[in-house]
Amino acid sequence: MTQKLDSLELLYKAFDGLSVEGGWHRRAPALWPEPRKNFVPFRWRYADVKPILDAAGDLVDHAMADRRNLTMTNPVEGNLYATVRSMVAAYQLIKPGETADAHRHTPNALRIILEGKGTYTVVNGMRVEMRPGDVLLTPSWAWHSHSSNGNEDCYWVDVLDVPLVHLMEGMFFERHPDKLEPNVVDADSSPIAFRWEDSVAALETAQAPANGMAEREIQLGNPALRTVALHVQRLNAGFRSAQYRTTANSIFTVIQGRGRTVVDDEVIEWSMGDVIAVPAWRTYRHEVDSESFMVRSSDEPVMRSIDMLREEVLTPAIA
Ligand code: GTQ
Ligand code: FE2
């Protein structure tokens, strides 16, 4: 360097072309006192999406698409994909006789079945039926395909940690060289399948969660996936939950019932099949009109493992 940098003007000029920035005069802040409101609370209505999925069922076959899925994109400006910062949710439809070929990817995935029988998922060579209310896991890098040999359309909600994988630059994806796994075995029960009747039975004797966000709650797995925790919650008619916030990002899937969730000051009505995004550190509470079951998918395991899980109950539940 030949010229002495003896003024701020010259100092900043010297930054040019070096890809450096002074921490004391950033274009955008790097640190702030508490989580910022970035992703927005949002609800996707199953009733709105189902006709679109049905139309896609006629127009888009599995030769055109690996998966006939409809991604729920958080409407925050600049976002093209994620539902909350770490996870994406999608509705998926498989029609009678269809097969979605095997592939594997580093993102973890899970499915929450809404409607339809006679559909199977094959995960690492194990074929398991998917029935309404069931939750099925596809851990990172497991081969998986889906197929229907029944006579009902099957609709479900996928939740994947793809946005987290994008952030971490750890994406790998490949299609199975033979389209489907060879040597598939049928399994009635499997560590990757949580059955609805088992969840309902476990909820009968389950405790209320300490945060007051449901009347009864169970966890599926511990956690279900390395990056995603799953909680099934039962909330009876008239229940008013606590007001609560957590640094974990959540996606709720309504299995049954009707009610509303108030996030900050926004009232979000929901019913069966709806999906609700509750981003990190938003204060929220539920009000329930009829006996409701919800599955909460959250990135709690990620937050916990990096000492970033913080929770706060602002007001307790009213039973
Ligand atoms: O079913 O394998 O919604 O790989 C997105 C990516 C579903 C799946 C999605 C996937 C799948
Ligand atoms: Fe997949």
Image (cartoon, grey):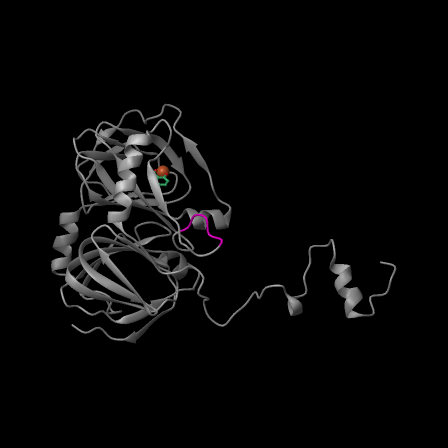
Q: Residue at x 29, y 67 (%)?
A: 262
- Residue 51 drawn at (x, y percent): 26, 41
Ligand 2 shows up in which quadrant of the image?
A: top left
Q: Is residue 221 above or below residue 23?
A: above
Segment tinted magenta in the rendering? 78-82
Q: Hey, which quadrant is residue 215 in on the image?
A: bottom left
Q: Is residue 192 visible?
A: no
- Which residue in the rendered view is the most extreme toward the right? 2
Q: Residue at x 36, y 50 (%)?
A: 226
Q: Is residue 186 above or below residue 191?
A: above
Direction from residue 50 to residue 237 in the image, left or right? left
Q: Hey, which quadrant is residue 140 in on the image?
A: top left
Q: Is residue 221 visible?
A: yes
- Which residue in the rendered view is the most extreme toward the bottom? 315
Q: Is residue 241 above or below residue 111?
A: below
Viewer-proximal residue, 22 or 122? 22
Q: Residue at x 48, y 44 (%)?
A: 170
Q: Hey, which quadrant is residue 64 in on the image?
A: top left
Viewer-proximal residue, 182 or 79? 79
Q: Quadrant of the C terminus?
A: bottom left
79 drawn magenta: yes
196 drawn magenta: no
Q: What secondary structure prevails in the magenta region?
A: loop
Q: Residue at x 46, y 38 (%)?
A: 172
Viewer-proximal residue, 268 or 168? 268
- Residue 74 drawn at (x, y percent): 40, 53
Direction from residue 209 to residue 197 in the image, left or right? left
- Residue 282 drawn at (x, y percent): 37, 67
- Residue 36 drawn at (x, y percent): 46, 66
Q: Quadrant of the N terminus?
A: bottom right
What count of labels does the image hold? 0
